[in-house]
Amino acid sequence: MEIDSNLIDEFISEAGEHLEEAEKCLLLLEEQTAGPEVIDQLFRGIHSIKGTAGFLNLEAIAELSHAMENLLSLIRAGTRESGSEVIDALLRGTDFLNRMLAELSAGKSDNIPEYRSLLPLLAELSGENTSAAPIGEKTPSAQSKTYFFSFPTPEQLADLPPEYTCFYEIRMSGTVEELKGAETEMLNFGYIIEQHDEDGMSAVLLATMIEADLINDIITAPEFTAVLLSPENEQAPLHIADAPAPPVQTPPAKPVKAASEKVAAERTGEAKNVPSSRGNETVRINVEVLDQLMNLAGELVLIRNQHIQHFTGRNSMQEEISRRFDAVTSELQTSIMGIRMQPLGNVFGKLPRIARDLAKRLDKKIDLTVSGEEVEVDKTILESLADPLTHIIRNSCDHGLECTAERLTAGKPPVGRITVGARHEGGQIIVSIADDGRGIDPEKIRHKVLEKGLRKEEELMLMTPKQIISLIMLPGFSTAAQVSDISGRGVGMDVVKTSIEKLGGTLDIDSAPGQGTTLSLALPLTLAIMPSLIITSGGRRYAIPQINLEEVICLFGKETAERIEIFNRQEVFRHHDNLLQLVRLEDVLSSAKPRTADGPAPVRREPVTTLNIAVVKVGTKRYGLAIDSVLGIEEIVVKPMHPVLKGLRCYQGTMILGDGTVSLILDIDGIARHMLGQIHCNVNRQTPQVVVARSDDAQRVLTFSSGTKENFAVSLALVKRVDCIDPADIQYIGDRRFISIDGTPTQVISLDQALQVSPCEMNEDMFLILPKHIKRPFGILASSFHNIENAVANFQHCGYTEDGILGTAMLNGRLTVFPDIYRVIEKIEPEWFAAEGHVKHRQEDNRAIRILLAEDTPFFRQLVKKYLESDLYQVETAANGREALELLSKHSFDMLLSDLEMPLMNGWQLVEAIRNDSRFNDIPAIALTSLDSERDRQSALQSGFNDYIVKIEREKFLGHIAGFLAKHRRKS
Amino acid sequence: MKEQTFCPYYSFRVGEHEYAVKATSIREVRDHHDPAAITPVFHAPSTVSGYVNIRGEINVVLDLHRLLGLSGEPGLNRSLIFFQESIGPSFGILVDSTGDIFNIDDAILEPWHAQANDSRRERFTIAVYKAEGKLVSVLDPARFLIHETETPTT
C-alpha cells in the first residue's frame, strides 16, 4: 500500500511529540508523585501512536506500542505498580519507538529488529503471574534447566590458556550494541568458546579465570543469566538478573543497570587491559545542545574570519588580540567537534577475537596486534567502520596468510602476523591493516581481469603493478580460487571499497608478492564536515559533495553545442568514450515537478562561450550536471533540511557559507531521480557502453561482425542490450548453446546458423546482442562490436537478399547486411515459434489481403513489410501520406497501416483525408507509431484511425493485425 | 467583578490588515530585512521564502503574505519575526511592517473558532479584538508550520 508521505511525516512529528511527553510522564511516574492524569496522558500518547501506526501499516511500531499500551493499561487500572523495572522497560520502549521514527524519517522501514527483544519483557511485565510478584523481581525464562552449551571438550580445552579454569554459560538480552559491548567486555577477561545469537538474545560459552562470585560483575548486558558449567554437568545458576534472593556464592543482587555501571566505572579506573577510556568522567548531553554548540562555534569562526579581514595590520596590540582570538576560536571548534569523537578501540577490540576464531577454523597460526586504539573518529564513522574492517581481517586470514606448512617452506616464521594500526595524517585518519602473508601477485590479477573481461589488455599494459593490484576492488572480482564461506561468495573488496567510499574515505592496497599485503583506509575525521565543490547557478551558490564529484569539465564555444546531442529525448554528451546524460541545474531548479518521459523534449541549444559540466556519480549512476561557474572546494558544515522542506529530494542539506549566507547542498541522487527518473540512467562501465535507444530511434544502428567477411548492422530500436561474454562460459544442450545472462539461461545463436554467411569467429571475448520484444531469451553472437552509427538505412541499393535478411546497405563505405533477427531466430528454432501459436494465424487466405503501409523510415518500412509478408499478406508501401493517398485512389486495399510522424502528409492528415473521401472512407486503418502515450493514442483514434499499435514487437504486431482483421470481417 | 488578566502581544501589519501574536512566542524581530539575505529554496511551496542564517542557526522563513493567501505583491523592505522553538522548529515569518508590544486584557479578546470553510486568514486566527476602531486578528504562529503542506508550485 502506498501511503502519502505527508501523512507519514505528520505521524513522525506527532509521534515524536507524544514520545517526548511520554518520557516526561514516565520519569514523573518513577518519582511516585504523579497523579492519575499523568498515567492517563501517557496511556493516551502511546495509544494514539499505536492507532496511527496501525492505520499507516507500520507494523513494528504498532506491535511495540501495543505491548507498551498493554502494560500501561494495567498500571492505569492499578493492577500493576510502576516500579523502576517497569519504567525501565517502558523507557526502552520509547527509545526504540524514537529510533523507529528516526528510521522512518530517513525514508527507511520502521522495522529495527532489535525491538523484539523487548517484547517478551513487556509481555512478562504485563503477565498475570508476575502482577502479583513484588516489583523488581521477575522469573526469567532463561532460568529453566535446559542448557545451550555443554562443558568444553578436551580439544577445546587444549586451545585455552591453562589459567582459564571456569566455564560459564551466559545468556544475555539487549540491543545489538549492548550485546556486542558485553561480549567485548567479556573478552577482556576470558575467551568465548561458542556463541549463539538470536534477535536481541545471545548465549555465550565463556572460558575465564574469573571466579563464580565475581562473574556477574563483568557482564554488562542489561539482562543476563550466568551459569557455571562443571565437567559433571551439574550446572548451578549463579546469578539471575534482578533476582532479589541470590543463590549462594553470589553477592547481593542489585539492579543490574546500576551494578554494571558501577563496575564499569570501577574498572575504567583500575583495569590495565581496558585501553583508552581510563579515568574518563562523562556527562550526558542532549544532542540538541551539542548541535547548538556546533552552530555557535561555526558562527564564531565566521565572525573571526570577518574580524581578521578587517583588523589585520592596524596595530600590533590589535593584531595580538586578533591572533589569540583566532587561536582560541579554532581550538573551541576542534573541542566541540571532539565531543562526537569516539576511540577506534571500540571497533578494534573485536578484531583479535575474529582472527582467533578464523585461525582455528582455517588451521593457521595467526597473531593479530592492534595499535592506535586511542585514535578518535566521529561516532557515525566508527559505527560504519566495523563491517568493512571485519571483512578485511577475514580476507587477510583467509587469503592473505598462508598455512603453517606453506610458511615454513617459504622460510617464514610459522605464525602469521596481522597488524592493525591507526594514526592521524593530514586531517584524516589512516587505518592500516598489514599481513606478512603471500601477498598479491599482479600477474595473477592481470590474468584474472582479462579472463573476466573486466579490463582490456591495452588498458592493463599502461598500469603499474600497484594499479593492477587495486583492480581486485572491481565489482565481480574475487581472488580466492575456491569460494570459501569465510570471505564470502564473489563479493569481496568491492563491497569494502564501496562502504569506505560512502564514508567519504578511500581504500588503498599495496602488496609485495611473498612478503605481504597492506591495506590503508583513509577516513575523514567527521561526517558533519564535508568537502564540497561550491558552484553557482542563476547567481546562487550551491554545494556538490565531493564524494559525488568525479570531475569538472569545461566546454568552449562551438563545443558547447556540438558535443551535446539530443538522444532518446535527453541531452547527452560523449565523455571519455561514454555517453553521459546531461542535466542542467537551472532546469532542475526551475521545475518542481519531476521530469517525465512524455514531458517536453529538450531542444538543441545555441553555442555559448563556456559551459561547465560537473561529472557526478552516485552508486553506479553517472551523469553531467551543467552549472554556471565553479567557485572552489570548501569544507562545509552540513546541517539538515528544515522539517517543512524535508520532502524536497533535490537537496540533502544546508550549510552556511563564509560570508554567512545560507546555501543548499545538492542531492545528486535526488536530482537524478527528479530529472532522469523515468529514463534509463545507467552507463555501465564493465560492459561495452550501449546506450539503449527507445523505439523512436530507428535511425541508429549497431554495427558488428560475426564471421570474418561480412559487416552486419541491427537497429538499436530492436536491441535490449549488448553483453560481453566469455565463450568458455557457453554450455551445450545437444547442439544448442546456452549462456547464463543475469541468471537466465539464454540461447546463443550465430547468424551463420540461419544465413549463408561466413562462420562466426570465436574470439577470447565475444559479444552477445540481446534483442528486445522477445519472450524467450535469445542472444546473437558477435565476434566484434564496431560502433553505434547514425545512419539512414537505404535499402534501395540492395544487391543481395535471402530469407532472414531485411536488406543490405552501404554504411561508411562498407556493404552492410541488415539481418532480420526475429526471422533468424525463427529459422533456427521454428518449433518454438510454432509452439507459441504464431503459425496459427499464418493462414493461406491472408494471400488475398492487401495492406497499404505508409511509413517514412526506410528501415521500418522494410521491417514491417517483411513481418507482414512473413504472414503472407500482400503489402504495398508508401513513404508518406501523400503517396499513400495516391496509391489508394489507384488500387483497392483491405487495410491501411500508417505511421503518424511523416513528411509531406502525416498520419493524422492522411486518415482525415481518407475519412473525407467517399471512395475509400470505410477502409480499416491502424496507426503504427513509436509514440506511446495515452494522449497520442486518443488523438490518433479521434482523427479516424480504428486502432493503434506501438512499434514493434513482431509477435504482438502480427497477432494484433490478425485479430483486427478478423474482428473487422465479422463486423462487415 | 471579573478579574483582569493582561497578556503582552506584539502587533504587525500584512497588507491592509493588522495582526498580533503573543509576545512570549517571539524569539527575535529583524526590521527592514534585506530580501537578498534570504536564500530561496526552489521546489519549495510558494509560501516558503527561503532560508536565513540567524547566528549560525539556519531558519526557514515563511511569507505571511502568501500564507494568508493575500492578493497582490508584498513590499520589498519587510521585517522578519522569528518564533521560539516551542512554537515550531527554527522558523520565522515575513511581515510588511512591525508594530509594538502592548498588553491586552483577555476579557476584550473574542475567541475565534476556525471553521473548515474559513479563509486562510481565519484559519490562523484564534481571537479578534478591537483597538482604536480597527479589528486586529490574533494569530496562532504554531499553525503556520502545520499549514505548510500545500502542494509545491513552480
Image (cartoon, grey):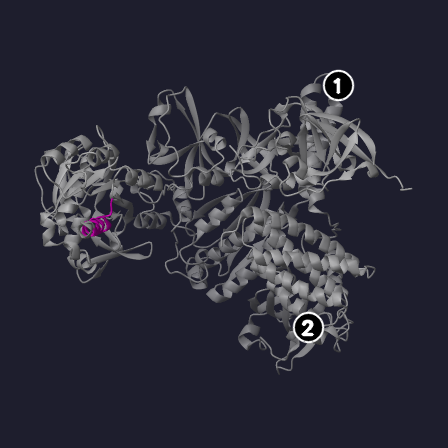
The disc placed on residue A316 is 1
The chain containing the residue under callout 1 comes to: A
Secondary-structure class at tag 1: helix
Which residue in the rendered view is the most extreme toward the top?
A314
Image point (16%, 49%), residue name: A823
Secondary structure of the residue carrying tag 2 is loop
Looking at the image, is A326 positioned above or below residue A363? Answer: above
Residue B130, image x and y in percent? 78, 31
Please tell me which of labels 1 and 2 falls first in the chain: 2
Q: Residue furthest left?
A: A799
Q: Amino acid at mark 2?
A: Gly
Residue A564 as seen in the image, left or right of residue A333: left
Amino acid bearing label 1: Ser
Q: Which residues are magenta?
A: A952-967
Q: In the displayed structure, does residue A452 sit left or right of residue A269?
A: left
The answer to whether A195 is drawn above or below residue A889 in the figure is below
Q: Position of residue A682 (x, y in %)?
A: 38, 42
Q: Are marks 1 and 2 in contact (CB under 8 Å)?
A: no
* Badge 1: residue crowd in 10 Å (few <14, some 14–19, many ≥20): few
Can you tell which quarter of the image residue A897 is in? top left
Image-based side of A349 in relation to A874, left or right: right
Q: Chain of mark 2?
A: A
Q: Which residue is mark 2?
A: A127
Give the quarter of the image for residue A244. Answer: bottom right
Say few, some or many: other residues with alpha carbon within 10 Å of mark 2 (under 14 / 14 to 19 / 20 or more): some
Say which of A560 and A227 sits in front: A560
Do we see residue A270 in this rendering?
A: no
In the rendered image, residue A962 lying in the magenta stretch gets the answer: yes
**Residue A78, x across and y down, in percent:** 77, 68
